[in-house]
Image: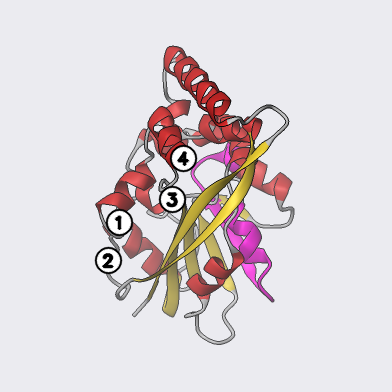
Amino acid sequence: MADERATSFGAQAGNYEVGRPEYPFDAVAWMLERMPSGSRRIADVGAGTGKLTRALVAAPDAEVVALDPDPAMLAALRDAIPGVPTFVGSAERMPLPDASLDAVVLGQAWHWVEPVAASVEIGRVVRSGGVLGLIWNIRDERQEWVRRLTEIMHGSAAEEMLAAGDPVIDAPFGPLEQESWEWSRPMTRAQLHSMATSRSYVITASDEEKARIRRDMDALFDEIGLDESGAIELPYVTRAFRAVRS
């Protein structure tokens, strides 16, 4: 992992589960549709509390395993999705046999990895013709209140990476294809606070900075008329990428 923030999420696993969105099923299906016929063995790497895992296990006959460097996140995943095998590991170090998988997918995670080492390791466990899939839910900042929310919370590592260009992958995977989906999620004031609290910048911030973020968020919510009993549509753009192993 490229940043100590990458392993900070377990401290806020509950808020991560409440505040983070799941992934549009169409986007997940698109990410995997290049898998060879009859494929079913998929690893969700950097699985966290299982936001992406839920969509994977819904696929017919899928055999899914989940990996994350943080045992606390995996414990939350097992509570949410009983029966999915879990392993402590990362994209650069996967405790799985050679050529044992048809696909490896990462949701909100590739920005934490070293892309060359991760490509090589994932290439080891994915058989020829298998798929590497990368997916992110990014808040749509074309709405002013969303842009102001990001300014208060600070941009994430994912947002910074995608703003700079497409993800970088390496051999043995071929060129990246990409697609995007626009959608929204109704969020209460409490859920928005949980979302902010689950972000790595906030988890690792000082108590003073955490208090400042909560205060400024409450001021924004008051301004846009979001009270404790209401909800607002938080717009997202889901960006998905896929590449086939040679």
Q: Residues within 10 Å of mark 4 (few under 14, many from 20)?
A: some
Q: CA distance from mark 4 to mark 3?
A: 22 Å
Residue 56 occupies which quadrant of the picture?
bottom right
Q: CA distance from mark 3 to mark 1?
A: 11 Å
* Secondary structure under the numbered disc 2 in the rendered image: loop
Q: Is residue 151 left or right of residue 33?
A: left
Labelled pair 1, 2 in contact (Cβ < 8 Å): yes
Query: Residue 75, can we see it?
Result: no
- Compared to residue 167, the image places residue 174 above or below, namely below
Find residue 115 and name its label: 1
- Compared to residue 207, the image places residue 23 above or below, namely below
Q: CA distance from mark 3 to mark 2?
A: 16 Å
Q: CA distance from mark 4 to mark 1?
A: 30 Å
Reading the image, the residue beneath label 3 is 109
- Compared to residue 162, the image places residue 205 above or below, namely above
- Residue range in magenta is 51-73
Q: Position of residue 69 (x, y in %)?
A: 49, 44
Reading the image, the residue beneath label 4 is 146
Reading the image, the residue beneath label 2 is 170
Viewport quadrant of the N terminus = top left
Q: Position of residue 231 (x, y in %)?
A: 66, 38
Residue 94 occupies which quadrant of the picture?
bottom left
Q: Amino acid at mark 2?
A: Asp
Q: Report the mark closest to the observer, 3 or 2.
A: 3
Labelled pair 4, 3 in contact (Cβ < 8 Å): no
Labelled pair 3, 2 in contact (Cβ < 8 Å): no
Q: Amino acid at mark 1?
A: Pro
